[in-house]
Amino acid sequence: MSTTSVSLPAVGRRSPHRGRMKSFYPSWFYLPAAALYLVFFAVPTFASFYFSLTRWSLFDVSFIGFDNFVQFFQEPMLVQGFVNTFIYGFITSALKVVLGLALAVLLTSQLVGRGYLRSVVFFPVLVSAIGVGITFKVLLDPSDGLVNHVLSFFGIAGPGWLTDPKLALLTVAGVDVWKGVGIATLIYIAGLAAIPQEYYEAARVDGAGAWKTFRTITLPLSRPATATVIILSLIGGLRSFDLIWAMTKGGPGFTSDVIASVIYKQYQAGFYGLSTAGNVVLFLVVTAIMVPISLFLNRKEVER
Amino acid sequence: MTAQAGLAAPVRHGRPGRTLRRVRSWIIGIVSIVLSLFVFVVPFVFIFLTASKTAPEASNLSFTWPQHWALWDNLVAVLTTRDGLIVRAFVNSAVLTIVSVAIMVVVSAMVGYLLQRKRSRLNPIVNFFVLAGLIVPPAVVPTIWVLQSLELFKTMAGLILIEATFGLSFCILLFRAFVATIPRELDEAAVIDGAGPVRLFFTVVLPLLRPVMITVVVVQAVAVFNDFTNPLYFLPGDENATVQLTLYNFQSQTLSQWNLLFMDILLITIPPLVMYIFFNRQIVAGMTSGAVKG
């Protein structure tokens, strides 16, 4: 508030009341949010850097340097969780981009039953991950599940979707896409609606086919929507925990573990220091991926 | 098809293809509807059918019409399990959702409003923390450590504050974007009429935020109600749990009673479904708010 006189020349032209108005936006409006943020988010986040360097139980803390991180990258089951986090995050994100865009193009065209289709694609977004997880665990049951029954009807021997170590993570990723593709579709629909209709008409007059129209108009002009979908689904995918936990608990063995489930397992086992080190690793992974990606996606947008 | 139409005469473009296009849209529409039935509708029908079966029949896990409808019996059985544990869980989840969303909305509306209205050197810092709050995964055990030292661990109050905090960033972004559409002249008029800053915000600005507020409330209410991870960490246990935690625990306890398990899923799905039916447009608006402006 003391800077009023300094910043006035630039801002003050619009209204003579601006100088007086400044004090009507009191800075203490930040305080309640800042207090919550500080106590329940910032302090734990900063504390995690210290605690990740300790052997920590309920009763005592002893400083052990980087031992937790060394352990994190030496034990195969922890390394597997680290690698799986990337696989899971990138697969779900990529599929949501591709399927979301395809569904959005479909659902913005002249189509019978468009309203019904839009709601039905979106509805899984609103169902809890635990409910979806349990339901698909049953549907994907290797011997009794509906999916393999249908496959065997066509003469295909369905695999053990959640019991095959090679498949479990991919299956969960697939269910994640089933549950989350509705948001991606919705974002793309909003993005496509912002493309001026004249472009399509011009392309049609110029004799461009459907594929060419898609490649030269729809794809480049839905870029802001693509950026949003990639960012949102990567943030969600890299931290993902509840669906994986509901469906496989990281199993069979630890083949579908991700960092978030490793954090929970180590916490349950009472290795608080190791669990917190997992949190720091997750923090580093998410920022190391998200910061460059969002910078890249946003810069391209400004240039255009 | 479209290429030929364009070549013939620009004025009549699209004309010759109209019936063809209508036929094609019917075919694509019907194929999509059939596919959507298999991919998106069958799982929900499966939940409903299994929830309607008797225990032995449900244990087949098959996708069949129930021989004996036991929907009501299952409902009563689920609601009375362990002295109404699930009813208590519903009450807990309702309290958690309502209180945390209320706190979140008011507190972040204040921030979004100030962030948009006032130019100060604080703004870049605040913006940075808002984005950080969106990206950075919360540190679990240190949060428990903080809650413990405040004696809030394993209490509903603690979980409420946690949920409110974790939702702040998303809400602030939505509010900030919406405040920009409210003309500043309104603030000035209110001030000239003698309103103080608090009255200006709560009686003039806040009512005007109604549309975005509905969006925020609905989206966050669904998110908090469906949240599993935070209750698992910060309000563990069986007795005082939320619905998602109860469902998760139920899964390991009632191995032979699939009908009751799916009845529980069905019950838990109803509140978001009702929200969706009533607030379809607001949910869509909230989810897509970032799409166009990026």
Image (cartoon, grey):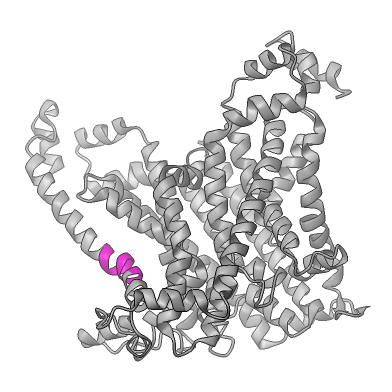
Residue sitting at x 75%, y 41%? B126
Q: How many marks?
A: 0
Q: Viewer-proximal residue, B229 or B256? A: B256
Locate residue A46 relative to residue A81 in the image: left or right: right
Rendered view: B253 above or below B148: below
Locate residue A67 relative to residue A188 in the image: left or right: right
**Residue A44 picture quarter:** bottom right
Q: Position of residue A168 (x, y in %)?
A: 48, 82
Residue sitting at x 58%, y 28%? B208
Q: Of helix, strand and loop, which mostly describes the magenta segment?
A: helix
**Residue B243 picture quarter:** bottom right
Residue sitting at x 71%, y 51%? B132
Residue A303 in view, yes or no? no
Q: Quadrant of the N terminus of chain A?
A: top right
Q: Position of residue A141 (x, y in %)?
A: 39, 86
Rendered view: A37 above or below A154: above
Rendered view: B125 above or below B66: above
The reply to whether the magenta stretch includes residue A26 is no
Residue sitting at x 21%, y 64%? B34
Q: Position of residue A80 (x, y in %)?
A: 61, 82
The reply to whether the magenta stretch includes residue B42 is yes
Residue A136 in view, yes or no? yes
Q: Viewer-proximal residue, B118 or B70? A: B70
Q: Which residues are magenta?
A: B36-44
Q: Position of residue B81 (x, y in %)?
A: 53, 80
**Residue A86 picture quarter:** bottom right
